[in-house]
Image (tube, helix red, strand yellow):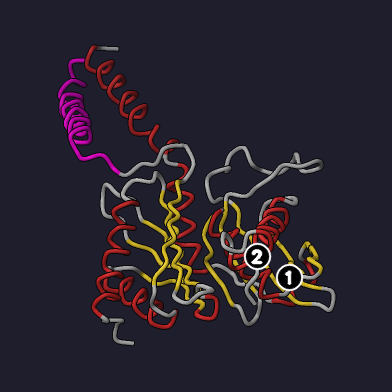
């Protein structure tokens, strides 16, 4: 192999090392670009019936739908972006960073795509006789994290209404 | 080998030129591997929620924002601002709430990949909003 070929090889390898590495580093760009510029256009909005049938549910006794809805908005904008919201239907879709790996969730594919705002949450808020119910369907497991955050937000609304007015306002 | 050289020399020169050109070109927006940085600001305004909403919507549209979702009943809006290199696209949730004592509280939550240029975006939004509200120009709708 002559010096010219070696030089070509070195240049090609250097080229791949310098500019190929950017693709790996740009994982979040690719994910977010895909999410926001492409997928967001076709983001599927679940129906209330679908979420009621398939979603994980958590009850909040003594809490109105209004309180739960307002507090949920606060929780979600602090942990991601709300991309769809329909108060009348009680359906909300948010893209968040909330992801967990709890017991029995070891197989969750987090290693390769645990990028910021990597989880999509579909939510339904209803009001029953005993109080509000929140139904959650997530792309990736969030365990109880969201429900706990919502509890804290509702509690903050009742204890410190000047800090979280949405929790107490009907 | 000698036959190959006339072919290799232009290829070598081409590679060198491509490499130099790419290195000299302005760097593309590339996020760090770290978290996406949100900016959360909330401010109270004396305007009622209808006036504040109309003004906020006008400010967003005038500022080149692409409104992607509006839930007027919840006082919630989602819009994006296009990338303006070196700044990445910015994604914003606006939440407007009536204050218990009157007036409106506006939450501005912006995300992009690295937090760069979020402060100017927020300052621009609130600056133009305050101009509108102070001037009584609440938009056309």
Does residue A170 show up?
yes
Q: What residue is drawn where x is 50% and y is 72%?
A: B99
- B15 and A26: which one is in front? A26
Reply above or below: A47 against A15: below
**Tag 2, which chain?**
A
Query: Which structural element holds mark 1?
Result: helix
At label 1, counting other C-alpha atoms closer than 10 Å, the crowd grade (few under 14, some 14-19, many 20 or more) is: many
Q: Which residue lies furthest to the bottom in this view?
A: B141
What is the quadrant of residue B67 in the picture? bottom left
Label 2 close to label 1 by CB (< 8 Å): yes
Reply above or below: A48 against B128: below
Q: Mark 2 or mark 1: which comes first in sequence?
A: 1
- A143 and B56: which one is in front? B56
Q: Mark 1 points at which residue?
A: A51
Please check the rendered image and state whether residue B26 is part of the magenta-colored stretch, yes or no. yes
Which labelled disc corresponds to residue A122? Answer: 2
Does residue A141 show up?
no
Q: Give left or right: position of A150 versus A38.
A: right
Q: Position of residue A141 (x, y in %)?
A: 71, 50
Determine the main secondary structure of the stretch shown in magenta: helix
Reply above or below: B138 against A62: below
- Total label count? 2
Q: Where is residue B135 in the image (x, y as percent from the top left)?
A: 23, 78
Q: What residue is drawn where x is 54% and y is 76%?
A: B74
**Tag 1, which chain?**
A
Which of the image's four quarters has the N terminus of chain A?
Answer: top left
Calculate the distance from the C-alpha at mark 2 to the C-alpha at mark 1.
8 Å
Query: Which structural element holds mark 2?
Result: strand
Looking at the rendering, the stretch of residues picked out in magenta corresponds to B1-28
């Amino acid at each position: 192999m002559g010096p010219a070929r070696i030089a070509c090889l070195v240049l090609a390898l250097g080229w791949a090392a310098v500019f190929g590495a950017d693709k790996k580093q740009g994982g979040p760009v690719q994910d977010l670009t895909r999410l926001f510029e492409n997928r967001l256009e076709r983001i599927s909005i679940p129906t209330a019936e679908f979420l009621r049938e398939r979603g994980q549910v958590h009850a909040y006794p003594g809490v109105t739908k209004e309180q739960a809805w307002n507090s949920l908005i606060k929780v979600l904008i602090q942990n991601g972006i709300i991309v769809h919201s329909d108060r009348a239907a009680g359906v909300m879709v948010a893209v968040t960073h909330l992801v967990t790996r709890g017991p029995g969730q070891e197989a969750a594919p987090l290693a390769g795509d645990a990028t910021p705002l990597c989880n999509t949450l579909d939510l339904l808020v209803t009001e029953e006789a005993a109080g509000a119910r929140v139904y959650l369907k997530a792309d990736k497991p969030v365990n109880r994290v969201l429900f706990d955050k919502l509890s804290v937000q509702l509690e903050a609304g009742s204890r410190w209404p000047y800090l979280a007015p949405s929790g107490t306002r009907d | 080998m000698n036959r190959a050289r006339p072919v290799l020399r232009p290829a070598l020169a081409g590679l060198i030129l491509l490499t130099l050109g790419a290195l000299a070109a302005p760097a593309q927006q590339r996020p760090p591997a770290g978290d996406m940085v949100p900016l959360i600001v909330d401010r109270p305004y004396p305007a009622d929620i209808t006036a504040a909403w109309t003004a906020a919507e006008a400010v967003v549209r005038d500022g080149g924002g692409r409104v992607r979702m509006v839930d007027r009943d919840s006082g919630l809006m989602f819009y994006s601002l296009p990338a303006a290199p070196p700044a990445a696209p910015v994604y914003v949730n606006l939440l407007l709430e009536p204050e218990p004592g009157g007036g409106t509280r506006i939450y501005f939550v912006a995300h992009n990949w690295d937090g760069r240029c979020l402060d100017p975006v927020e300052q621009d939004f609130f600056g133009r909003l305050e101009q509108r509200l102070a001037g009584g120009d609440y938009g056309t709708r």
